[in-house]
Amino acid sequence: MPSAISTTGLTKHYAGVHAIEDLTLDVPQGSIYGFLGANGAGKTTTLKILAGLTRPTSGSATVAGIPLAAGESYKQAIGYLGQEPRFYDWMTGRETLRYVAGFYPWVQDPIGRRIDEALDLTGIADAADRRTGTYSGGMRQRLGIAQALIGKPQVLLLDEPASALDLVGRRDVLDLMEGLRSQATIFYSTHILDDVQRVSDHVAILDQGRLVRAAPTQELLASFTRDRLRVVVRRVQEATAGGLAALPGVASVELADHDLDQATFLIQARAGQTDSVQRAVTRYAVESDLTLVTNSPETVDLEEVFLRLIDSKERAA
Protein backbone atom coordinates (compact mmCIF):
# COMPACT_ATOMS: atom_id res chain seq x y z
CA MET A 1 0.00 0.00 0.00
CA PRO A 2 1.60 3.30 -1.07
CA SER A 3 1.95 6.18 1.36
CA ALA A 4 -0.75 8.83 1.19
CA ILE A 5 2.02 11.39 0.60
CA SER A 6 5.65 10.70 -0.18
CA THR A 7 8.32 13.29 -0.89
CA THR A 8 11.96 12.74 -1.79
CA GLY A 9 14.50 15.53 -1.63
CA LEU A 10 11.80 18.16 -2.11
CA THR A 11 13.46 21.57 -2.42
CA LYS A 12 12.18 25.06 -3.19
CA HIS A 13 14.41 28.10 -3.62
CA TYR A 14 13.28 31.64 -4.25
CA ALA A 15 15.62 34.55 -4.91
CA GLY A 16 17.87 34.61 -1.87
CA VAL A 17 15.58 32.29 0.12
CA HIS A 18 15.79 28.54 0.68
CA ALA A 19 12.15 27.90 1.62
CA ILE A 20 12.45 24.09 1.69
CA GLU A 21 15.61 22.05 1.62
CA ASP A 22 15.77 18.31 0.86
CA LEU A 23 12.41 17.39 2.44
CA THR A 24 11.89 13.62 2.49
CA LEU A 25 8.66 12.56 4.15
CA ASP A 26 6.18 9.66 4.20
CA VAL A 27 2.60 10.19 5.37
CA PRO A 28 0.69 6.96 6.17
CA GLN A 29 -2.73 6.45 4.64
CA GLY A 30 -5.64 7.19 6.97
CA SER A 31 -3.57 9.36 9.30
CA ILE A 32 -4.10 12.86 10.65
CA TYR A 33 -0.62 14.23 10.08
CA GLY A 34 0.46 17.44 11.79
CA PHE A 35 3.08 19.43 9.87
CA LEU A 36 4.54 21.61 12.56
CA GLY A 37 6.83 24.60 12.48
CA ALA A 38 7.23 28.23 13.43
CA ASN A 39 6.03 30.96 11.08
CA GLY A 40 8.33 31.04 8.07
CA ALA A 41 9.52 27.47 8.51
CA GLY A 42 8.37 26.46 5.02
CA LYS A 43 5.01 24.84 5.82
CA THR A 44 2.89 26.85 3.39
CA THR A 45 5.43 26.44 0.58
CA THR A 46 5.32 22.67 1.08
CA LEU A 47 1.50 22.64 1.02
CA LYS A 48 1.44 24.73 -2.16
CA ILE A 49 3.85 22.34 -3.89
CA LEU A 50 1.74 19.35 -2.85
CA ALA A 51 -1.39 21.15 -4.04
CA GLY A 52 0.21 21.78 -7.45
CA LEU A 53 0.15 25.56 -7.00
CA THR A 54 3.92 26.00 -7.29
CA ARG A 55 6.69 23.84 -8.68
CA PRO A 56 9.62 22.55 -6.64
CA THR A 57 13.13 23.56 -7.56
CA SER A 58 14.12 19.91 -7.28
CA GLY A 59 12.93 16.66 -5.76
CA SER A 60 9.73 14.71 -6.24
CA ALA A 61 6.40 14.03 -4.57
CA THR A 62 3.53 11.58 -4.92
CA VAL A 63 0.03 11.55 -3.47
CA ALA A 64 -1.73 8.18 -3.28
CA GLY A 65 1.07 6.85 -5.46
CA ILE A 66 0.43 9.41 -8.21
CA PRO A 67 3.42 11.60 -9.15
CA LEU A 68 3.13 15.35 -8.80
CA ALA A 69 4.03 15.68 -12.47
CA ALA A 70 0.98 13.61 -13.53
CA GLY A 71 -1.19 16.71 -13.84
CA GLU A 72 -4.93 16.04 -14.02
CA SER A 73 -4.85 12.59 -12.40
CA TYR A 74 -2.76 14.00 -9.56
CA LYS A 75 -5.28 16.77 -8.91
CA GLN A 76 -8.04 14.17 -8.63
CA ALA A 77 -6.35 12.74 -5.53
CA ILE A 78 -6.20 15.95 -3.48
CA GLY A 79 -8.41 18.51 -1.81
CA TYR A 80 -6.82 21.78 -0.69
CA LEU A 81 -7.69 24.52 1.78
CA GLY A 82 -5.37 27.51 1.91
CA GLN A 83 -4.87 29.92 4.77
CA GLU A 84 -7.77 32.30 5.45
CA PRO A 85 -10.09 31.03 2.68
CA ARG A 86 -12.16 33.65 0.89
CA PHE A 87 -15.48 33.20 -0.89
CA TYR A 88 -17.89 35.31 -2.89
CA ASP A 89 -19.86 36.92 -0.06
CA TRP A 90 -23.01 37.16 -2.15
CA MET A 91 -23.13 33.41 -2.75
CA THR A 92 -24.74 31.04 -0.29
CA GLY A 93 -22.78 28.11 1.08
CA ARG A 94 -24.67 25.75 -1.19
CA GLU A 95 -24.05 27.92 -4.26
CA THR A 96 -20.37 28.09 -3.39
CA LEU A 97 -20.09 24.31 -3.28
CA ARG A 98 -22.01 23.95 -6.55
CA TYR A 99 -19.61 26.41 -8.19
CA VAL A 100 -16.56 24.53 -6.85
CA ALA A 101 -18.02 21.17 -7.88
CA GLY A 102 -17.85 22.32 -11.49
CA PHE A 103 -14.06 22.06 -11.31
CA TYR A 104 -14.29 18.29 -10.67
CA PRO A 105 -15.98 16.85 -13.80
CA TRP A 106 -14.40 13.43 -13.23
CA VAL A 107 -16.49 12.71 -10.11
CA GLN A 108 -19.45 10.50 -11.06
CA ASP A 109 -21.66 11.19 -8.02
CA PRO A 110 -24.44 13.72 -8.72
CA ILE A 111 -23.44 17.23 -7.66
CA GLY A 112 -26.48 17.67 -5.43
CA ARG A 113 -25.66 14.54 -3.45
CA ARG A 114 -22.01 15.58 -3.06
CA ILE A 115 -23.05 19.02 -1.82
CA ASP A 116 -25.43 17.55 0.75
CA GLU A 117 -22.77 15.09 1.95
CA ALA A 118 -20.14 17.81 2.30
CA LEU A 119 -22.56 20.08 4.18
CA ASP A 120 -23.53 17.28 6.55
CA LEU A 121 -19.93 16.16 7.13
CA THR A 122 -18.80 19.67 8.01
CA GLY A 123 -21.85 20.54 10.12
CA ILE A 124 -23.06 23.59 8.20
CA ALA A 125 -26.18 22.16 6.56
CA ASP A 126 -28.38 24.53 8.59
CA ALA A 127 -26.51 27.53 7.16
CA ALA A 128 -26.27 26.20 3.61
CA ASP A 129 -28.71 28.74 2.16
CA ARG A 130 -27.26 31.77 3.94
CA ARG A 131 -24.85 34.10 2.19
CA THR A 132 -21.27 33.32 3.08
CA GLY A 133 -20.75 36.97 4.02
CA THR A 134 -22.78 36.25 7.16
CA TYR A 135 -20.60 33.28 8.21
CA SER A 136 -18.41 33.37 11.29
CA GLY A 137 -14.71 32.53 11.04
CA GLY A 138 -15.33 28.96 12.16
CA MET A 139 -18.15 28.50 9.65
CA ARG A 140 -15.95 29.81 6.84
CA GLN A 141 -13.30 27.26 7.76
CA ARG A 142 -15.94 24.53 7.72
CA LEU A 143 -17.10 25.71 4.30
CA GLY A 144 -13.48 25.70 3.16
CA ILE A 145 -13.09 22.09 4.24
CA ALA A 146 -16.41 21.25 2.55
CA GLN A 147 -15.16 22.66 -0.77
CA ALA A 148 -11.95 20.67 -0.35
CA LEU A 149 -14.05 17.51 0.06
CA ILE A 150 -16.35 18.13 -2.90
CA GLY A 151 -14.02 16.38 -5.36
CA LYS A 152 -13.92 13.18 -3.27
CA PRO A 153 -10.15 13.41 -2.62
CA GLN A 154 -8.01 10.71 -1.07
CA VAL A 155 -5.86 13.32 0.70
CA LEU A 156 -6.88 16.61 2.30
CA LEU A 157 -4.21 19.33 2.41
CA LEU A 158 -5.11 21.98 5.00
CA ASP A 159 -2.92 25.03 5.59
CA GLU A 160 -3.30 26.39 9.14
CA PRO A 161 -7.00 25.38 9.29
CA ALA A 162 -7.57 26.63 12.85
CA SER A 163 -4.86 29.18 13.61
CA ALA A 164 -7.00 32.28 12.94
CA LEU A 165 -9.93 31.11 15.07
CA ASP A 166 -10.90 31.69 18.67
CA LEU A 167 -10.87 28.81 21.17
CA VAL A 168 -14.41 27.66 20.34
CA GLY A 169 -13.79 27.84 16.59
CA ARG A 170 -10.52 25.94 16.93
CA ARG A 171 -12.19 23.23 18.97
CA ASP A 172 -14.96 22.84 16.40
CA VAL A 173 -12.56 22.59 13.46
CA LEU A 174 -10.36 20.06 15.29
CA ASP A 175 -13.44 17.98 16.12
CA LEU A 176 -14.39 18.15 12.45
CA MET A 177 -10.94 16.96 11.38
CA GLU A 178 -11.18 13.99 13.76
CA GLY A 179 -14.57 13.14 12.30
CA LEU A 180 -13.14 13.16 8.76
CA ARG A 181 -10.49 10.56 9.54
CA SER A 182 -12.44 7.83 7.73
CA GLN A 183 -13.00 10.03 4.67
CA ALA A 184 -9.44 10.93 3.72
CA THR A 185 -5.87 11.23 4.95
CA ILE A 186 -5.46 14.70 6.48
CA PHE A 187 -2.15 16.51 6.14
CA TYR A 188 -2.28 19.91 7.79
CA SER A 189 0.17 22.60 8.77
CA THR A 190 0.07 24.54 12.01
CA HIS A 191 2.20 26.34 14.55
CA ILE A 192 -0.26 25.61 17.39
CA LEU A 193 1.33 22.79 19.35
CA ASP A 194 -1.72 21.92 21.45
CA ASP A 195 -3.76 21.26 18.31
CA VAL A 196 -1.22 18.77 16.99
CA GLN A 197 -0.98 16.90 20.28
CA ARG A 198 -4.76 16.69 20.50
CA VAL A 199 -5.70 15.29 17.08
CA SER A 200 -2.60 14.14 15.19
CA ASP A 201 -1.41 10.54 15.25
CA HIS A 202 1.75 11.53 13.31
CA VAL A 203 3.83 14.68 13.36
CA ALA A 204 6.68 16.22 11.40
CA ILE A 205 8.67 19.19 12.69
CA LEU A 206 10.11 21.63 10.19
CA ASP A 207 12.69 24.28 11.06
CA GLN A 208 14.03 26.81 8.57
CA GLY A 209 12.95 24.65 5.66
CA ARG A 210 14.54 21.44 6.92
CA LEU A 211 12.88 18.41 8.44
CA VAL A 212 14.00 17.98 12.03
CA ARG A 213 11.98 14.93 13.07
CA ALA A 214 9.02 12.88 11.81
CA ALA A 215 7.37 10.17 13.89
CA PRO A 216 4.10 8.91 15.35
CA THR A 217 3.08 11.53 17.91
CA GLN A 218 3.04 9.30 20.98
CA GLU A 219 6.29 7.63 19.95
CA LEU A 220 7.94 11.04 19.64
CA LEU A 221 6.68 12.15 23.06
CA ALA A 222 7.77 8.88 24.66
CA SER A 223 11.29 9.31 23.29
CA PHE A 224 11.75 12.42 25.44
CA THR A 225 11.80 12.15 29.20
CA ARG A 226 12.80 14.32 32.09
CA ASP A 227 13.60 11.26 34.22
CA ARG A 228 11.59 12.95 36.94
CA LEU A 229 8.78 11.67 39.17
CA ARG A 230 6.03 13.68 40.79
CA VAL A 231 5.37 12.07 44.19
CA VAL A 232 2.59 13.11 46.56
CA VAL A 233 2.48 11.53 50.02
CA ARG A 234 0.37 11.97 53.13
CA ARG A 235 1.40 11.47 56.75
CA VAL A 236 4.73 12.99 55.74
CA GLN A 237 7.50 13.04 58.33
CA GLU A 238 10.63 15.15 58.81
CA ALA A 239 12.77 12.27 57.57
CA THR A 240 10.72 11.69 54.40
CA ALA A 241 12.74 13.93 52.08
CA GLY A 242 16.01 12.41 53.25
CA GLY A 243 14.64 8.90 52.93
CA LEU A 244 13.56 9.52 49.35
CA ALA A 245 16.91 11.10 48.50
CA ALA A 246 18.72 7.99 49.77
CA LEU A 247 16.88 5.61 47.45
CA PRO A 248 19.01 3.94 44.75
CA GLY A 249 19.00 5.84 41.46
CA VAL A 250 17.78 9.14 42.92
CA ALA A 251 19.82 12.16 41.84
CA SER A 252 17.91 14.84 43.77
CA VAL A 253 14.69 15.52 45.67
CA GLU A 254 12.85 18.85 45.63
CA LEU A 255 9.98 19.71 47.98
CA ALA A 256 7.46 21.36 45.64
CA ASP A 257 4.55 21.80 48.04
CA HIS A 258 3.74 21.08 51.68
CA ASP A 259 0.26 21.45 53.16
CA LEU A 260 -0.46 20.11 56.65
CA ASP A 261 0.53 16.42 56.50
CA GLN A 262 0.66 16.17 52.68
CA ALA A 263 3.73 16.95 50.60
CA THR A 264 4.64 16.97 46.91
CA PHE A 265 8.17 15.98 45.92
CA LEU A 266 9.86 16.21 42.54
CA ILE A 267 12.33 13.34 42.37
CA GLN A 268 14.99 13.49 39.71
CA ALA A 269 16.12 10.01 38.72
CA ARG A 270 19.44 9.27 37.16
CA ALA A 271 19.28 8.74 33.41
CA GLY A 272 17.41 5.58 32.48
CA GLN A 273 16.47 4.70 36.07
CA THR A 274 13.01 6.28 36.30
CA ASP A 275 11.16 2.94 36.44
CA SER A 276 13.35 1.46 39.17
CA VAL A 277 13.14 4.66 41.22
CA GLN A 278 9.37 4.63 40.88
CA ARG A 279 9.24 1.10 42.30
CA ALA A 280 11.64 2.06 45.10
CA VAL A 281 9.41 5.01 46.06
CA THR A 282 6.42 2.69 46.36
CA ARG A 283 8.35 0.28 48.60
CA TYR A 284 9.65 3.16 50.71
CA ALA A 285 6.13 4.53 51.21
CA VAL A 286 4.85 1.15 52.41
CA GLU A 287 7.80 0.56 54.71
CA SER A 288 7.59 4.10 56.17
CA ASP A 289 3.81 3.97 56.74
CA LEU A 290 3.17 6.81 54.27
CA THR A 291 0.02 7.17 52.20
CA LEU A 292 1.14 7.34 48.58
CA VAL A 293 -1.26 9.56 46.61
CA THR A 294 0.73 10.02 43.39
CA ASN A 295 3.86 8.38 42.04
CA SER A 296 4.12 9.06 38.33
CA PRO A 297 6.66 10.27 35.76
CA GLU A 298 6.28 13.88 34.70
CA THR A 299 4.90 13.97 31.20
CA VAL A 300 6.64 15.80 28.37
CA ASP A 301 4.28 17.73 26.10
CA LEU A 302 4.79 18.55 22.45
CA GLU A 303 5.75 22.14 23.20
CA GLU A 304 8.77 21.03 25.19
CA VAL A 305 9.73 18.45 22.56
CA PHE A 306 9.42 21.04 19.80
CA LEU A 307 11.54 23.61 21.61
CA ARG A 308 14.20 21.04 22.43
CA LEU A 309 14.33 19.77 18.85
CA ILE A 310 14.70 23.14 17.18
CA ASP A 311 17.41 24.21 19.59
CA SER A 312 20.55 23.89 17.49
CA LYS A 313 22.77 22.60 20.29
CA GLU A 314 20.38 19.85 21.33
CA ARG A 315 19.68 18.89 17.72
CA ALA A 316 23.39 18.52 17.07
CA ALA A 317 23.72 16.35 20.19
Image (tube, helix red, strand yellow):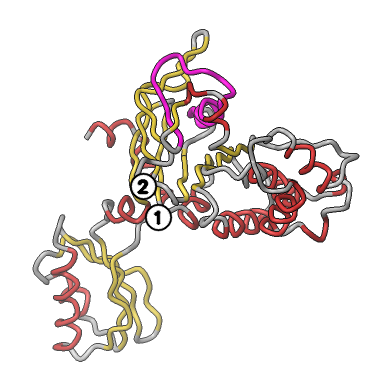
User: Which residue matches tag 2?
Assistant: 305
Q: Position of residue 163 (x, y in %)?
A: 62, 44
Q: Secondary structure at mark 1?
A: loop
Would you say residue 88 sits in the magenta stretch? no
| Discs 1, 2 touching: Cβ within 8 Å | yes
Q: Position of residue 225 (x, y in %)?
A: 27, 55
Within-10-Å neighbours for mark 2: few <14, some 14–19, many 20+:
some
The extreme front residue here reads 108
User: Which residue matches tag 1?
Assistant: 301
Using the image, determine if residue 100 lies above or below residue 192.
above
Q: Amino acid at mark 1?
A: Asp
Using the image, determine if residue 5 lies above or below residue 130.
above
Q: Amino acid at mark 2?
A: Val
Q: Position of residue 207 (x, y in %)?
A: 41, 31
Alpha carbons under labels 1 and 2: distance apart? 7 Å
Rendered residue at 14%/88% (across/down):
287
Part of the protein shown in magenta:
41-63
Q: Taking 220 as reference, is 84 left or right?
A: right
Rendered residue at 64%/46% (across/down):
149
Q: Taking 50 as reference, is 123 left or right?
A: right
Within-10-Å neighbours for mark 1: few <14, some 14–19, many 20+:
some
Q: Nearer the viewer, residue 151 or 302?
A: 151
Rendered residue at 46%/35% (across/down):
63
The extreme bottom residue here reads 289
Q: Nearer the viewer, residue 179 or 242?
A: 179
Q: Position of residue 213 (x, y in %)?
A: 33, 38
Rendered residue at 74%/46% (across/down):
111
Q: Secondary structure at mark 2?
A: helix
The extreme left residue here reads 248
Would you say residue 46 sits in the magenta stretch? yes
